[in-house]
Image (tube, rainbow, N blue to C red):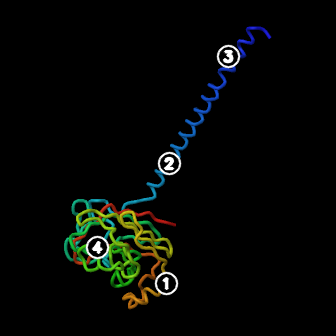
Amino acid sequence: MSRSHLRTLRALTRALPAVALLAACTGDADASADATTTGEASITIEAQDWRPLFDGQSLTGWHGHQTPDVVPAGWAVVDGAITRVAAGGDLVTAEQFANFELEFEWMVTPGGNSGVFYRIDPAVEVTYMSAPEYQVLDDSAHADGRSPLTSAGAAYGLYPSPEGQTKPVGDWNAGRIVVNGANVEHWLNGTQTAGYTLWSPEWEQKVKDSKFAAWPAYGRATRGHIGLQDHGDRVAFRNIRIKVLP
């Protein structure tokens, strides 16, 4: 082998690691770009799955229970939140939902009591006679806060909520309800506070042992309205959005 050929071979040998490194870096960059693109697509798809139930300005899409053309006078939009300002009855969505994930923020005044109903049967005269309730409450000052069964985040009267999950009165709390077939979850400020299976032997027994036993339609609907309870106290809800599940 000539000296010139030997010098060329040595130069190529020294360059090979750099070429390999460049190829590896280029591959990582492509993989990173693909991951970023995929991530962005996932985020976009995820965002598209959710839709607001409240536009922050009006009560469009809401009406009174069994009064589809009337918005109760006791509800108004105040500072970008649906607010119970006077007597008027429960406020419900115009749409009905079967399986869904619902997120919302809520705030009560001192001693305040309210709730979020789901799968309300529009044929039943009173919302709570058919619909399970996510309890909204000032645990620190209301009498219901003395029992885990009726504290904030509980499945009212049936499944208890752990103590100490609410923020101070005047702060916004984050609520979440997941209803998927017979399975239900309640969440409050990032903590699961209740979970149960509708129509299971345990659920049936709890209903039988509660005041709900007097109402045959309680918890039987497989779809229905979502409702905000007028319990006589000022309460506000905002950032209400829903993801419909299959």
Q: Which residue is mark 3?
A: 11
Q: Quote the CA–CA distance across marks 4 and 1.
A: 26 Å
> Residue at 78% across / 8% down in the picture?
2
Q: Which residue is mark 2?
A: 41
Q: Residues within 10 Å of mark 4 (few under 14, many from 20)?
A: many
Q: Quadrant of the N terminus?
A: top right
Mark closer to the observer (2, 3): 3
The answer to which of marks 4 and 2 sits earlier in the sequence is: 2
- Res 210 → quadrant: bottom left
Q: Of residues 237 and 226, which is closer to you in this image?
A: 237
- Say if mark 4 contacts mark 1, CB within 8 Å: no
> Residue at 41% across / 64% down in the picture?
242
The answer to which of marks 2 and 3 sits earlier in the sequence is: 3
Q: Position of residue 105 (x, y in %)?
A: 32, 64
Q: Residues within 10 Å of mark 2 (few under 14, many from 20)?
A: few
Q: Which residue is mark 4?
A: 137
In the picture shown, does residue 53 fall above or below 184? above
